[in-house]
């Protein structure tokens, strides 16, 4: 019997240059059209691609909105995202059109947690300012009062979003001597809480008043957009550092900058931005902010593993099965 859900030789459009090994495997396995350019597709190019393929492989910078999905060809049945976050894809519109969306969770967890931990250490210890001083040639040598920052050991870390990356950050932070507080949609199992020695705060506002460093790890979704707004920033004590390696839109960037400028926040470590790649120029003038260009997951190893996940999802779907990383609306 022929399984009507199978798609033996899917036409796959990849929106942007991926690692060579991933591209080569995609080409060997499927009827693949690669945009071999390291530039995001224009909206027109995306619309044209979506008009005539079975599978679209976008990256996290392609905005796949409801209009594009509505205009997609009948044959488009799978959007196999190259990346964990899916806030750039309208999941509701995809479901309405019967299009499955998959992502690549897990393979980016440790790298992103490493980068987050680097920011957690760098901001209080003024790593960027120290590096700038050395490069300037102005450094006059060690002095008892030179380049003083704040110790992170013994401080309270508040993690918002205690999923894969949040938990991986907690593990690292324990090793640095931080105590762990978290707010998450769901409480973790007791055994995981015990392993991480993490204290759950069902009330985010209450947690914000009790921590020294705040780090954000929820996906960007309807509930988390601007979750850290001016009112919540006002709940943070002025010595608090804010770290964001999840998505810019979770923090009200203007409110955060106002607080940094006014000394109501001690500093920030930012890997993600509201309007990437545009950086608000006011941030560039602030010495207590460490900024990285959305590179939390940027390792060679991670990119290859991400490619493998994309391929596994397409293969499973093409064989008529539910792909392992199907994103369910309401979960992301
Ligand atoms: N900077 C970078 O390069 C990278 C950033 N990311 C970002 O990190 C995000 C998290 O990734 P994972 O940890 O793998 O996801 P995950 O799905 O394992 O964990 C997310 C957690 O957030 C919780 N959550 C969701 N919405 C919430 C809300 N409104 N309030 C409270 N908790 C909420 C969920 O219950 C879950 O426990 C991704 O969605 C992506 O946006 C991911 C990879 C790399
Ligand atoms: O995968 C993601 O969500 C990213 O932000 C880039 O790796």
Image: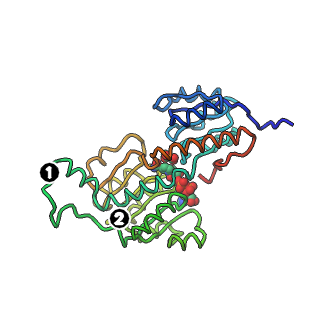
Residue 220, given in percent of the width and then of the height, sits at 52, 51
Crowding around mark 2 (Cα neighbors within 10 Å: few <14, some 14 to 19, many 20+) is many
- The quadrant of the image that shows the N terminus is top right
Q: Please report the residue visible at 54 percent of the width from the left and 58 percent of the height from the top.
A: 164
The residue labelled by disc 2 is 240
Q: How many marks?
A: 2
Q: Secondary structure at mark 2?
A: loop
Q: Name the mark nearer the viewer: 1 or 2.
A: 1
Q: Please report the residue visible at 58 percent of the width from the left and 36 percent of the height from the top.
A: 57
Q: Which numbered dot is residue 138?
A: 1
Q: Could you tell me if residue 220 is visible in this image?
A: no
Seen in the picture, residue 59 relative to 134 is either above or below; the reply is: above
Label 1 or label 2, whichever comes before in sequence order? 1
Crowding around mark 1 (Cα neighbors within 10 Å: few <14, some 14 to 19, many 20+) is few
Q: Secondary structure at mark 1?
A: loop
Q: Residue lying furthest right in this view?
A: 1
User: Which of the pair 253/78 is nearer the observer?
Assistant: 78
Seen in the picture, residue 254 relative to 214 is either above or below; the reply is: above
């Amino acid at each position: 019997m022929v399984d009507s859900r199978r798609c033996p030789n899917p036409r796959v459009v990849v929106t942007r240059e991926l690692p060579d090994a991933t591209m080569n495997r995609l080409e060997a396995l499927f009827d693949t059209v690669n945009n071999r350019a390291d530039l995001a597709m224009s909206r027109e190019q995306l619309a044209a691609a979506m008009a005539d393929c079975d599978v679209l492989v976008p990256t996290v910078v392609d905005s796949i909105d409801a209009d594009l999905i509505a205009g997609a060809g009948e044959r488009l049945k799978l959007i196999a995202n190259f990346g964990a976050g899916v806030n750039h894809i309208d999941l509701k519109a995809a479901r309405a059109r019967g299009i499955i969306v998959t992502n690549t969770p897990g393979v980016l967890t440790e790298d992103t947690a490493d980068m987050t931990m680097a920011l957690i250490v760098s901001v209080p210890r003024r790593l960027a300012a120290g590096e700038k001083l050395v490069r300037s040639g102005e450094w006059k040598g060690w002095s008892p009062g030179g380049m003083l920052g704040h110790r992170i050991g013994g401080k309270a870390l508040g993690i918002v979003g205690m999923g894969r990356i949040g938990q991986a950050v907690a593990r690292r932070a324990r090793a640095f001597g931080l105590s762990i507080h978290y707010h998450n949609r769901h409480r973790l199992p007791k055994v995981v809480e015990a392993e991480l020695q993490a204290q759950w705060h069902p009330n985010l506002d209450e947690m914000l008043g009790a921590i020294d460093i705040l780090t954000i790890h929820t996906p960007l979704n309807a509930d988390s957009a601007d979750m850290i707004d001016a009112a919540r920033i006002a709940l943070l004590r002025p010595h608090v550092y804010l770290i964001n390696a999840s998505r810019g839109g979770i923090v009200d960037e203007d409110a955060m900058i106002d607080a940094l400028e006014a000394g109501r926040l001690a500093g920030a470590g930012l890997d993600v931005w509201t309007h990437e790649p545009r950086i608000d120029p006011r941030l560039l003038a602030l010495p207590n902010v460490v900024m990285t260009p959305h590179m939390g997951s940027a390792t060679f190893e991670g990119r290859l593993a991400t490619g493998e996940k994309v391929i596994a999802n397409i293969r499973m779907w093409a064989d008529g099965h539910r792909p392992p990383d199907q994103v369910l609306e309401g979960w992301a």
